[in-house]
Image (tube, rainbow, N blue to C red):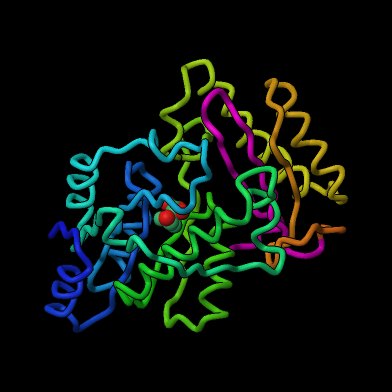
Amino acid sequence: MKVVRSKRELRAALDERRSGSVGLVPTMGFFHKGHLSLMRRARSECDTVVVSSFVNPTQFRPGEDYESYPRDEQRDIELARATGVDLFFAPPVDEMYASDHCTTVRVRGGLTEVLCGDPHRRGPEHFDGVTTVVAKLLNIVQPQRAYFGQKDAQQALVVRRMVRDLDFPVEVVVCPTVREADGLAMSSRNVYLSPDERQRATALSRALEAARRAAANGVVTPAEVLAVARGELAAAGVEPEYLELRSLEDLRPVESLERPALLAVAARIGRARLIDNVTLGGAEL
Ligand code: PAF
């Protein structure tokens, strides 16, 4: 595995291996099993696997955890190497953003203004940061496939819409959320949790799973399904930032569960802002 820091080095390394397909796994580093599952999937489907590791400043709001976001590059390099990654692209900030960078890729259409993009939460600008850096990474790497985790379902839908609207010649592959044995969705931010908070955090996946089961067993209205989830959260003393059922296609609120739906939750537990989701009715992202 080669570690590269500049776009020029990356392109040269890709040019050397230009035959065959290229898969990109964009990450912000501090790998957990979720990241590794994306890399394994890419390894099984592509001739060359590129992992980018870049804590992207433009997707953090002032006051969010950009500075303190967990980082351990040496460990990440070892894990990526052991997972069979070919190129590890870890650029410094000034390699990705010129000092006079002034271009933003903005997806709207109701996809980025809701859930995490609500102006009272991370705001749609969070997704502007994501789409801008993902667009840049797709242009730099020019992969045939790019891999994202379902845990960030809204991000995956937003990236997919950008790819469709701007005709990026890439397939967006969304892979299942990887969970701890007790259901907690893997996240780099789980390291912020104290043992007590870590225990309380399991309420998120419990709530989603209870709601999913209720829907599968004939609970039919969105309000009833949400009440089941809300009950689990309340029992653990967790007040969600949001708990919403939305269309899996365009993130509009759903009035019935006859169409594919996403049940998504966010909650602050101690210092950590955690998100999780499930799809209802056996639908896939
Ligand atoms: O999901 C992430 O880690 C980031 O949002 C991404 C896609 C790497 C863009 O910075």
Task: Residue 24: name its quadrant.
Answer: bottom left
244 vs 60, left or right, is right
Query: What is the span of residues highlighted in magenta in the rendered image?
Result: 258-285
- Tell which of 258 and 52 is nearer to you: 52
Which quadrant contains ligand 1?
A: bottom left
How far across and down, in percent of the image, does residue 25 sit?
Answer: 35, 61
Q: Is residue 213 above or below residue 160?
A: above
Locate the N terminus and report the quarter of the image it occupies.
bottom left
Tell which of 118 and 174 is nearer to you.
118
Q: How many marks?
A: 0
Q: Residue furthest top?
A: 196
Residue sticking out furthest to the front:
100
Q: Residue at x 13, y 60 (%)?
A: 2
If the image is split into quadrants, where does the C terminus sit?
Answer: bottom right
Q: Identify the residue shown where x is 53% and y is 49%.
A: 151
Q: In x, y percent, where is residue 257?
A: 81, 58
Look at 65% across and 54% down and name the residue there. Answer: 279
Q: Is residue 269 magenta?
A: yes
Identify the residue shown where x is 36% and y is 48%.
55
Magenta-colored stretch includes residue 221: no
Q: Position of residue 167 (x, y in %)?
A: 50, 84
Name the side, left or right, on which 21 lies relative to 194.
left
Magenta stretch: dominant SS? strand
Quarter of the image for residue 38 reads: bottom left
As drawn, 10 above or below 196? below
In the rendered image, residue 185, in percent from the top left (x then y), is placed at: 51, 39
Is residue 271 placed above or below 73 in the rendered structure? above
